Amino acid sequence: MAIKVPVIIINGFLGSGKTTLFRNILSQSKKNNMSVCAIVNDMSELDVDGEIIASSSVVESDKNILESISSDVLSSKTGIKKLDKAINNLLKNKSPDLIVIETSGSCHPMPLIKYFKEHQKVFLTGVLILIDCLMLSHDYKLGENLIPIMKQNIIKGERSTTNLLVEQIMFGSHIILTKSDRIAPNELNKISNHIEKINPFTSITPIIFGKLTLDSVMEIEKYDFDNVSRLIDELQPMLDSKKNIEKPYNLSTRVIKDDRPFHPERLWEVCHKHLDKKIFRSKGFFWLVSRDDQSLLWNQAAGAINLEIMGTWRAAIIENKKNNLLKEEMSFLKERLSKESGRFGDRCCELTIIGDENHIDQFVEKIYSCFLSEKEIIQWKKGFKFNDPWPKKILKLNT
């Protein structure tokens, strides 16, 4: 009889730090010569996390260890089918020591838990629920308001993102508190106490920058399905309701694609004036006209935006007269650029924005107003310098 492969689920609300932990685990697996396969899910058609993981040194050395699922949520019926196919693909090519699944932030853990309970080739160990301490502090009074708000929703017959957050905690075998270094110790204790009232069976671990050892992950015991069997029976009718399937938690997604750069000053002003807690998550790749050589990663959760350098645009390398490239290298880059459809070579802006359906379009409209006008593009080409209030020192993404 074939040995079943253990599976870890990394779940948690939008912007809680799932990809950071996910990348950390994959990086450790390479250093420890362990065979770890990965499945990454994005509810948007723009698979930002999948592209980041795919560009990491771990995956670049072996493309067969990664399956990416976009334009869907794993907890949906179609998502479960895609998950099943992804697992079969991984097991067809590999005999891994572990499979790690990173869900999208809007994913409910229950359908995945039900799926793995009956699986013949893999077995579920940990359901790691990541909780953003800052978000819980600012939006839920350190977690104290989670249950009262959920009870109000039940009375009203509504299901909001609060319901999702509470239910993610209920199903978690392990709660991982992220950004814990930005919370006072006494506040961290209060967060833990409120979480324990929701799920007394879980373990709670604060981490910083996704630093959780692979050894501790491998030591996680098999998931206890008995602890959640009654909870599954209670929640199943609500998750199966037509309203929940068509508009889960009133979340909407928008994708912005444009070859133009952002005006740095207008983008700064829009983000500071119009980015509120109703815009849960935005991420993607972009460029600023003031830094036209840099491919930048946009990473926003709640009201905080983090920028990282992905690399240098190919177009910028060719335009640089001091690039010291060989003739063959220049020919290769020019051939790659000839396949790009944008006006500025491979430079482009591609962002996913996830937010409350009643607020998202207004914010997206504001973001579009930040792109350079045709008049400003002419100014840029003539050498005009645009004021740039964004931080001058931005770290390069560590892949």
Image (cartoon, rainbow, N blue to C red):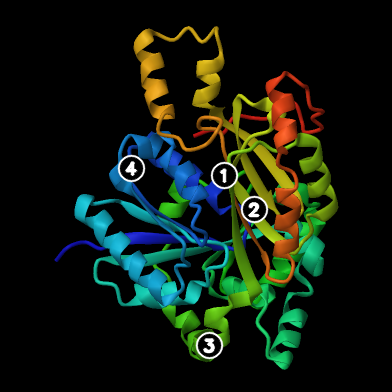
Disc 3 designates what residue? 242
Q: Dot 2: few (<14), some (14–19), or many (≥20) neighbours within 10 Å?
A: many
**Cα–Cα gap, marks 4 and 3:** 43 Å
Disc 1 designates what residue? 211
**Cα–Cα gap, marks 1 and 2:** 23 Å
Disc nearer the start of the sequence (2/4)? 4
Disc nearer the start of the sequence (4/3)? 4
**Cα–Cα gap, marks 1 and 3:** 39 Å
Q: In this view, does 200 lie above or below 359?
A: below
Q: Residue at x 37, y 9 (%)?
A: 327
**Cα–Cα gap, marks 3 and 2:** 27 Å
Tell me which amino acid carries mark 2. Answer: Ser
Q: Is residue 212 above or below residue 45?
A: above
Disc 4 designates what residue? 34
Contact flag, marks 1 and 4 (Cβ < 8 Å): no
Tell me which amino acid carries mark 4. Answer: Met
Disc 2 designates what residue? 282
Disc nearer the start of the sequence (3/2)? 3
Which secondary structure, mark 2? strand
Disc nearer the start of the sequence (1/4)? 4
Disc nearer the start of the sequence (1/3)? 1
